[in-house]
Image (cartoon, helix red, strand yellow):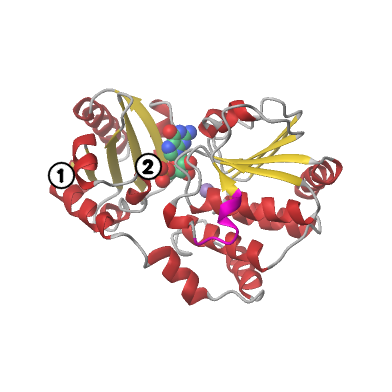
Amino acid sequence: MTNSKFEEIGRILREHQRFAILGHVRPDGDALGSQLALALSLQQLGKEVRVWNEDGMLEKYSFLPRAELLTKPPSTPEVVDVAVALDTAIQNRLGTALPAVRSAKIWINIDHHLSNPCYGDVVYVDPAAPATAEIVFRLIKSQGLPFNHDIAENLYAAISSDTGSFQYPQTSARTFEIAAELIRTGLDVGRLSQQLYENYPRRRLELLRELLRTMRFERGGRVASFSLSSKTAAELGVLPEDNEGLIDHLRAIHGVIVAVFFEELADGKVRISMRSKSDVVNVCAICQKFGGGGHTLAAGARVRGTLDEVEEKVLEEIGEVLKSHS
Ligand code: 5GP
Ligand code: MN
């Protein structure tokens, strides 16, 4: 089953010429690294490849090899044969990349989100994979697609970031085997880790300081949250990417089961980011109630309303779920 799906994808990749490799809005290391890795492999195969993300390349991931290939999508659609969506739980999380690939005849959907409804013509969704990059690696290897040091570095950065440096529960022996194979291409793990985790702008810590001022605990300390208003974000001059990972400070607290980050957006919505430390609290299910999705232990949504309204509704819902399990 697994192999025949990879074979079908491999055949489509070989038989077509013009590709668009896409990833989700507000991209993380897994989306960007997976996009670049697959794109580089296809380029080596002699394909014409566009690598588009609504947000373009983020400053913090601009160290990824060949980062310059990844750009914002053009406002006028371009002709492509195949669109490949990577790490994207629902198709409209491709944002402005979606209209740019209107001409695609074939859609391939490769992802690891539990909530993925399996859109597209050929679908490979493996919720057991800790990162989409792990699936991309297996696809490349099983189909004998081109593989080199730059591809390995992109995949390693993607897997390291989506597993929380090889810590999250879905990190498996296979994840370490893949990491070992990537490292054997000559990767400098120390340098990559520094680029990933020890190269933040000072404003990210200034943001954390403000977030901690809003920190609150509920349900006997089992729920922790903090929030960011657009006013504070503007005053600090933070970029959307600056808050990636800050929620981990809440999750790391003893006794906390659910951590939530609320971020006021410009469009009258609030972005929620949620983490769980227990299988009995499925934050993907909670976020789906608010129109979002993700993984059992890490999920998100965008909810219409003010910061106060959304905080109240979401914290109430988490409370209900905790109540039914205590
Ligand atoms: P984060 O909290 O890091 O933004 O996202 C955690 C996980 O939930 C990610 O895997 C992300 O793809 C997913 N996710 C975040 N926001 C949304 C959303 O608005 N809709 C859906 N379907 N998934 C989301
Ligand atoms: Mn991912």
Asked whether residue 48 is in view, the answer is: yes
Q: Dividing the picture into quarters, in which one does residue 33 lie?
A: bottom right
Q: Is residue 106 above or below residue 144?
A: above
Mark 1 residue CB less than 8 A from any atom of ligand 1? no
Q: Which residue is mark 2?
A: 281
Earlier sequence position, callout 2 versus callout 1: 1
Q: Dividing the picture into quarters, in which one does residue 240 lie?
A: top left
Amino acid type at image mark 2: Val
> Residue extending furthest left?
213
The picture places residue 21, in percent across and down from the top left corner, at: 65, 42
For the C terminus, the image quarter is top left
Amino acid type at image mark 1: Thr
The picture places residue 261, in percent across and down from the top left corner, at: 29, 42
Q: Is residue 65 magenta?
A: yes
Q: Is residue 202 above or below residue 270?
A: below
Q: Residue, x 22% and y 25% (percent of image)? A: 309
**Which secondary structure, mark 1?**
loop
Q: Is residue 156 magenta?
A: no
Mark whose residue sits in front, 2 or 1: 1
Q: Which residue is mark 1?
A: 214
Magenta segment: 63-69
Q: CA distance from mark 2 to mark 1?
A: 24 Å
Q: Residue, x 77% and y 60% (percent of image)? A: 146
Q: Are marks 2 and 1 in contact (CB under 8 Å)?
A: no
Q: Is residue 62 left or right of residue 212?
A: right
Q: Is residue 263 above or below residue 30?
A: above
Asked whether residue 282 is in view, the answer is: no
The picture places residue 27, in percent across and down from the top left corner, at: 48, 45
For the N terminus, the image quarter is top right
The picture places residue 120, in percent across and down from the top left corner, at: 68, 30
